[in-house]
Image (cartoon, rainbow, N blue to C red):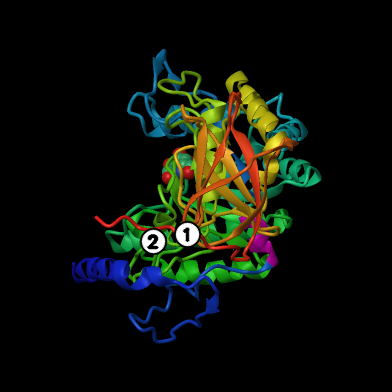
Amino acid sequence: MMRKILSGILVVSALFLGRIASSTAQDIPNNTPRTSLALAHGAHRLGKRTDPMMERWRNYGLGQFIHWGVYAIPGGQWNGASYGGAAEWIRSWKGMPKEAYDNLYKEFDPENYDPSALAKQAKEMGAKYMIITTKHHDGFCLWPSEYTDYDVTNTPYGKDIIGPLVEAYDAEGIDVYLYFSVMDWNHPGYRSVLATEEDRSAYESFKEFTRNQLLELLERYPTTKGLWFDGTWDEAWKEQAEFADNLATEMRKKIPGLIIGSRFRPDDYGNRHFDSNGDLMGDYEQGWERKLPETYEDTNGNDWDCVMTIPENQWGYHSDWRGHVKTSYELIEMLVKSVSLDGNFVLNFGPDAKGDIRMEEKKLATEIGQWMSKNKSAIYNCGHIDWEKQDWGYYTQNRVTGEVNMVVFNKPINSVLRIKTSSKISLQKIYDLNDATKIYDPEEISQDEYIIQLGDEELAEPKVIVIKYDHSKGETKGYEKAKT
Ligand code: FHN
C-alpha cells in the first residue's frame, strides 16, 4: 500500500520534475544519486540516444508490423460465432474452450507462406523496418525454441518461420525487430500476480524461461536490430526491476546497440515507460498504440513509435473486420503526422492461416507505396520543425539538408496556404516536389509570416511543397502591432 502511495506521489512529481530531459544524451550510472530520487533500475540515460543505430531508427519514418500465430486459424470465429475482440485474444473469450485453442497448433500449416513476397510488398510500401511477433500472449513460438514444445516445429508446417523472414527482409534492406510478449499463457510458471510463495517459486522458472528464450532469439537471429516488447503490464512483472534491467544488459551484450523501447522493464517502484522521476526508460517511447500525439509537447521531446491497425482493433487475422477500415489517405496522414512530431509510424498486417495477406491490406500497401514512391523525401530522414502548425497539413524537415516539406492534405477554399516560421529566415525557393518547374512566390504578410497561392490546382492526393531557406535575417519590415 505504502509503495502504491509513494509511487503515486512520485508519478505526480514526475510531471513537474522529469519531463525536462535535455536532448543531448548523458549516461547515468546505476545508483547515482539523482536530484529527485535515486533509482537503481530507473532510466540510465537522459535524452535521446545519439549513436548511428538509433539515428538509423529515427530516420525510418515508416515500418511494418506483422501479427501472426495460431490465432489466424480461427480468424476470430468459433463454432459459427464471431468474436468481437481482437483476433489474437480469442483464447480469452468464453465462447472458445481453452483446450480447443491450445490444440490449434496441430493444424498450423501455412502452405502459402512466402517471406520474400512479404518483404517485397513491404519494400514497395516504403517500409524501412518491420516487427514480427515471434511469440504473442498465447505463448506459441514461430521459431524452433529449445525451451518449449509449443512451437512451430510441432506443427504440420514443422519449419522455422522467423529465420527465412529475417533473411528475406534483410535481403530487401528492411531492418527486422522481434516482437516478444513477456506474458505467456502457456508456460506453467507464468503468473500475472505473485500472491503466494508457490507463485513466487513458479515465477522464478518462468523468468529463467523468458531469459533463455530471449537470448536464444538473439543468438539465432543476430541481424536483429531490436526487440519490441509487449505483455509487460502484469503486477508480477512489475516487481522484476532488477531482473529485467540485468536481462536488458545481457541482451545488449549479445547485440551491441540493440534497440529496446519503453515497454520492457519496470523501475524500482514498478513504474513502466517513465520511471519514478518521470524519465523515459528504454530507447524510445512505446505508449502510442492506435493513437497519435496531438502536439510535439505530448511527445516530451522523446523518440517514439506509433503502432496502428487498419481496422479499429485487429492485429491478428480476423475474417470479419467490423467497423471503420482506414483508407490509404487516412494512414498516409497518420504517417506524415508521426514524422512531423519526430515519430515512426508502423502499420500492422495480419496474414491468414495459409500465410496470405488479405486483399484489403494488399491494396492499402500498394496505395501507400504509390504515394511513398513520389513523396518519400518528405518522410525518410525527416522530423519535427517548430513552425506553427497550419490547417492545410503538416511540416516535416529533412534532418540533413534542413529543407522543409509542406505536406498538404487540405486545400482551403481561398487557395491560400499560410506559412508561419518560428524566427526570421530568408526563403530561397518554394516548389512542388514532383514538378520543380512549379515555383510558388511567397508573399510576406506579417512578421515571420507568409502566404503562397495554390491557384486553380486541384489536390488529387496529399501534395508536397518544398521550402528551401537559410537563416540570414534578410530585411526586417516594421509591422505595427494593433493598439487594442
Ligand atoms: O494485447 C496486445 C495486442 O494483441 C497487440 O499485440 C498490441 C500491439 O501493440 N499490443 C497489445 C496491447 O498493448
Q: Position of residue 324 (x, y in %)?
A: 43, 23
Number of the label disc, if any, that sits on residue 46: none
Q: Is mark 2 within 8 Å of ligand 1?
A: no
Nearest the camera: 204 or 223? 223
| Residue indicated by mark 2 | 272
Q: Quadrant of residue 164?
A: top right
Q: In the figure, is residue 190 to the left or right of 48?
A: left
Of mark 1 and mark 2, the one earlier in the sequence is: 1
Q: Quadrant of ligand 1?
A: top left
Bounds of the magenta span? 52-58
| Residue indicated by mark 1 | 262
Q: In the figure, is residue 119 to the left or right of 217?
A: right
Q: Is residue 168 visible?
A: yes
Which residue lies at the image location 27% right of the left edge and 59% below the top edge? 195
Q: Position of residue 426 (x, y in %)?
A: 62, 58
User: The N terminus lies in which quarter of the figure?
Assistant: bottom left
Above/below status of 149 relative to 9: above
Q: In the figure, is residue 216 to the left or right of 307?
A: right
Which residue lies at the image location 36% right of the left edge and 84% below the top edge? 35
